[in-house]
Image (tube, rainbow, N blue to C red):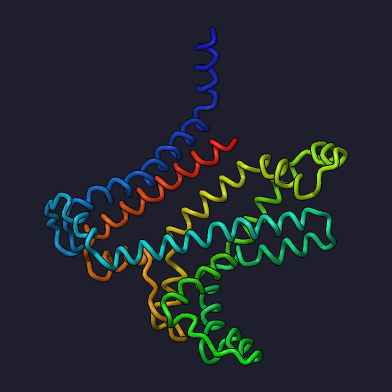
Amino acid sequence: MGKNKLVRSLRRNYFCVSVVIFIFVLYLILRFVPIGGTFYLSFHQWDLIKPDRPFVGLDNFRKLTSDFRFREALLNTTIFAGVLVPCSIVLSLLIATAINSGIKFTKIYELIYFIPVVIPMVPASIIWKWMYDPQYGILNYLLSLFNIEPKAWLVDPTLALYSITLVCIWKVLGYNMVIFLVGLRNVPRTYLEAAEIDGASWFQIFIRIVIPLIKPIILYLVVINTIDAFKIFTPVYTMTVGGQGSFGTEVKVIAYEIFQNGFRYFKMGYASAEALILFLIVTVITVVQFGLLRERE
């Protein structure tokens, strides 16, 4: 009887079921075919021009172990993620908590902090690049008011990395804040009121009640921010690769190294090996983050 009802329901909703299946299959194709192609090319040598793709086995991966540029890019990307993720999570949580505390002009503050999210990264990076300009940038002008030497924000590779990190924190802060606000506004008021009656301080309520209740949101944002951090490309290319306005010194990150090897030096097999390593790193970090946060529940 139950099977007959299911069959009749599927027949009545044939079009909807067909659309859902089509979208699901299309998603699988768009998601896994590029991954499979990258996996295949990582074991081959291909210059994007010749049709020949000779099999080289693990040779691309062996070269990566002795590639100084790849190691530097991996280190820079790790530093970038290690600074971006905790800073953006903590700052956005503090901002969301302040806005959720009942201050005036809540909607205005939300709008101000969310504006960077809707600005495309390319024009935002160009604006920040001019702000970082060693001669005409507003940041060095502000430093000069306090008799501080001007900084080569995008010329010194180390300083450029942290300058880009600041831009990305500014860009992601509003998104994280909105997600945190959703979680904070869904914390039951009865829990907070009961804790206040028992004499708990604001800090104790925040640490022992609010944080555990929004832990799934924290996990989501940590994972999403980490994945985005390891994929960083646009601000690096726009702000530190020469040719876009003011001076800049190239900052090596994994995504930019993949782009260079694949589309500038035409070493697509080598670039695919780098992309596969990046995929594995992000996967492992995500699994570890899930494991650590679940252990603390």
Q: Position of residue 97 (x, y in %)?
A: 74, 54
Among the 4 quarters of the image, the one containing residue 189:
top right
Left or right: 188 as drawn, with respect to 251: right
Q: Residue furthest right?
A: 197
Q: Position of residue 140 (x, y in %)?
A: 58, 87
Q: Nearer the viewer, residue 127 or 18?
A: 127
Q: Nearer the viewer, residue 113 or 87?
A: 87
Q: From the viewer's perspective, is residue 239 above or below residue 179?
A: below
Q: From the viewer's perspective, is residue 251 above or below residue 117?
A: below
Left or right: 165 as drawn, with respect to 101: left
Among the 4 quarters of the image, the one containing residue 89:
bottom right
Q: Nearer the viewer, residue 282 or 128?
A: 282
Q: Nearer the viewer, residue 31 or 241?
A: 241
Q: How many marks?
A: 0
Position of the C terminus, as image quadrant, is top right
Question: Residue at 56% across / 87% down in the picture?
Answer: 137
Position of the N terminus, as image quadrant, is top right
Q: From the viewer's perspective, is residue 22 above or below residue 86?
A: above
Question: Residue at 65% across / 58% down in the picture?
Answer: 92
Question: Residue at 31% across / 63% down in the picture?
Answer: 71
Question: Residue at 81% across / 47% down in the picture?
Answer: 201
Q: Position of residue 178 (x, y in %)?
A: 67, 54
